[in-house]
Image (cartoon, rainbow, N blue to C red):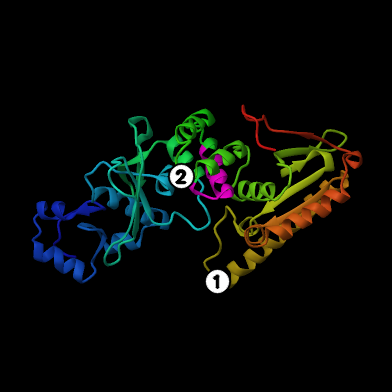
Amino acid sequence: MRGDPTLPLVFTHTEALAAGMSRHQIAHRVRTRSWRPLRRAVYIEEPRYAVLSDRDQRMTAVIATLMARDDGVVASHLSAAFAYGWVLPLAGTGPVTLTDGNLAAATRHTRLIGREEDLTIQVASLPVSDVSTCILDVARTRWEVRTTSRARTVADNLRHLPNADGVALADSALRQARVSYEQIAAVLDRQARWPYAERGRRALPLVDPRRDSWLESFSFVTLHRMGLPMPEPQVSLFDAQGRFVARVDGWLENEALALESDGRAKYFADEHPLSADVEVAAGELLALAHRRLTNEKDRRDRIVDLGAELARWGTREIVRSPGTVFARIAAARRRGGAGRFAGRTADLPAPAWPVGR
């Protein structure tokens, strides 16, 4: 609005008053929706909010929630994982989640007024070693967000999320190389009597950062829980002359079976911008998809020519019909056999801990 003072991207009622605005002016801007209330007495100008990415919009909710409180709570669980930039479940971050170290309080779920999001506040022991500060960049503005530490965040999510999602998140965290398996295990040991501790204990041995996507981690853990041996991730295949053939998402050595989890995006995503003409762009997309599908078929043929079996699935299938995927893999296992494989393999270096089998 013309004549308004320059305010931070996210600001409080007190900051608006200090900038020279009256209570009436503040109320008018909220009422007319030129300001969006993110939390009680914490706002963002609607035009600035509208141009933010989905990621930055979600991040402003976390920032505003912490700005609205002065009781030492920290962002935790999926909210902290989101701040760290880790892989999240398909359902996203859910409500903003905080942890309160005041054990006299009670865990609570709050729906606030207007357009504000839901809020969950967990109550749990919060030693200084489990608290950190995450530096974020939102719309070229630097923010310091109080969070649970990386190890505590992974441990909390391993306890609270289904195994497949928790392990995918942990794989992502370990790929960043700023938290260790041992640090996560130490937090889970301290949480041995906490809610869902057994879920976290069962999930931790399945963590393997060699997997390079949410889909791989989610798929292999889901299938493992159904009885499939845990595949060796990201295995390179070579022909008898030592020439590289392909790197596959997963490999079962005894059956010479390659496992591939495919998201549709890779058939359409491109590093080059599309034409501004809609009809031309549509043709470019179709040509790109056809070219990449042809390349995938050629790649599959080269793998099969080595004497290997190949089973493939997509995101929708593993999420909605994991039994169908499991049955397809079981059939491929029956057909396969190491004795038929004419190539050789090379694995990535294994983690320092034994991965669950």
Specify few, some or many for label 2: CA neighbours under 10 Å numbering under 14, 14-19, or 20 or more: few
The kind of residue on which mark 2 rests is: Pro
Residue 245 visible, this orientation: no
* Image side of residue 19 versus residue 191, left or right: left
Specify few, some or many for label 1: CA neighbours under 10 Å numbering under 14, 14-19, or 20 or more: few
Q: Which residues are magenta?
A: 160-173
- Pointers 1 and 2 in contact (CB under 8 A)? no
Tag of residue 299? none
**Chief SS of the magenta region:** helix
* Image side of residue 188 versus residue 204, left or right: left
- On the image, the x and y values in percent for residue 132 come to 35, 35
* Image side of residue 56 versus residue 257, left or right: left
User: Which residue is tagged 1?
Assistant: 278
* Quadrant in the picture for residue 339: top right
* Relative vertical location of residue 201 with respect to residue 66 in this rendering, above or below: above
Looking at the figure, which quarter contains the N terminus? bottom left
The kind of residue on which mark 1 rests is: Val
Identify which residue is drawn at 83% across, 52% down.
332
Q: CA distance from mark 1 to mark 2?
A: 53 Å
Identify which residue is drawn at 59% across, 55% down.
270
User: Which residue is tagged 2?
Assistant: 195
- On the image, the x and y values in percent for residue 191 come to 45, 36
Secondary structure under tag 1 reads helix
* Relative vertical location of residue 127 with respect to residue 323 in this rendering, above or below: above
* Relative vertical location of residue 126 with respect to residue 262 in this rendering, above or below: above
| First in residue order: circle 1 vs circle 2 | 2
